[in-house]
Amino acid sequence: MNKLILLSIFLLFSCSSNNSLMQEHNILHDESIRTFYTYVPSNLNKEMTLVVGLHGYTGNAKSFIRGGDANFNNFLETNNFIGAYPEGKSFKANGRNFSSWNDLAGSIGKGPKGDICDIDRDYYPFPPDCLNPHRCSWASCGDDIGFIEKVIDHHKDKYDIKSVIVIGMSNGGMLAQAIGCNLTDKVDAVINIEGMQALGMSCTPKKPITMVIYGAKNDTTVPPEDILASDGYFYEPMKNTVNDWKNSFNCANSTLEQISNPAIITKEKFYDCDGGVTITSILDHNNDHDWPKPYKWGINLLFDPILN
């Protein structure tokens, strides 16, 4: 087991109207220094909810948090949640910075249904921590699930945490679902934003866990309905993942809601499932590869099936 090294740097979060703090932490994990940030709300008390936010491919904690009215920390402050923002392993190639998460699919490149990319596909630089990568590999090969587990444990050791929600965008959504499948004893719910997993590699937990999954019809980067993405990679359709989860947890009932304002949304929620969990599918009829818009409303849309 790797020796844990923890360094904390307290930074005043300038975009918030309150005096809450962002804390930077660096730990040694899997022979690499990994970074995560903690947002502490102004009204810290007992039985807190921890929300772990996972950025997308080439992103970082700042790109996940966003700014202005869409600032994710504003949502945390309003709901009195603690936030944790880990950062994926990164490297430079072709003058750009590439960061990614290992969801146990994008690093492998081949699943039970074959290669996860077409013969004619866009090229992504192979992360340096991947030895002998498959031609379809594009994501880090590091132990990101173990890293997120350490992030969760750190906050549980320091704060009174009652529940844990993991939310991720795109590649971060892929990892959020993988965490739901692999850390069911540590996590209560996952929110997967446009992170359909590779074709044939969409995982299902062995124990019940609540999930919200969001996809947009105009998303050609990680499509929720079409198998083939614009870059030549194959993805499991969202409906297949939802069916696998609701059937695995024996969900007995469902509700179907059509939303027309401020966005056209089809929202289906499955409930009366094993363990009291719920499975919610949200299909956006107009959006592309982005959070549901407008962003502030979209954050509430994603969390509503879990909080209400």
Image: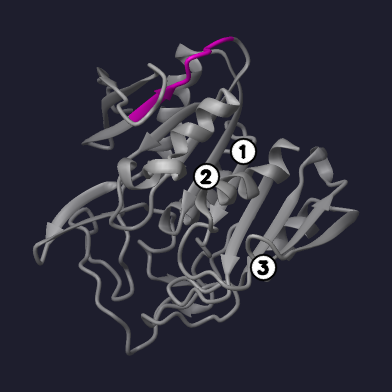
Residue 35 is one of the magenta-drawn residues = no
Q: Residues within 10 Å of mark 1 (few under 14, many from 20)?
A: some
**x and y percentages locating residue 152 in the rendered image:** 47, 28
Residue 41 sits inside the magenta stretch? yes
| Sequence-first disc among 3 and 1 | 1
Q: Residue at x 28, y 20 (%)?
A: 12
Please indicate, yes or no, whether residue 206 appears anywhere in the rendered image.
Answer: no
Q: Residues within 10 Å of mark 2 (few under 14, many from 20)?
A: many
Residue where numbered disc 1 is placed: 184
Q: Residue at x 52, y 12 (%)?
A: 44
Res. 259 visible in picture: yes
Q: Dot 3 corresponds to which residue?
A: 264
Q: Is residue 76 above or below residue 285?
A: above
In the displayed structure, 159 sits above or below 51; it is above
Seen as rendered, the residue at the extreme top is: 45
Location of residue 274 (image quadrant): top right
Secondary structure found at label 1: loop
Residue at 26 percent across and 67 percent down: it is 133
The circle on residue 167 is 2
**Start and end of the magenta stretch?**
37-45
Circles 3 and 2: CB atoms closer than 8 Å = no
Return the residue nearer the eye: 164 or 69.
69
Question: Which quadrant, please, contains the N terminus?
Answer: top left
Left or right, residue 290 beside residue 239: left
Between discs 1 and 2, the one toward the N terminus: 2
Q: Nearer the viewer, residue 54 or 71?
A: 71
Name above or below for residue 1 compared with residue 110: above
Identify the amino acid type marked 3.
Answer: Ile
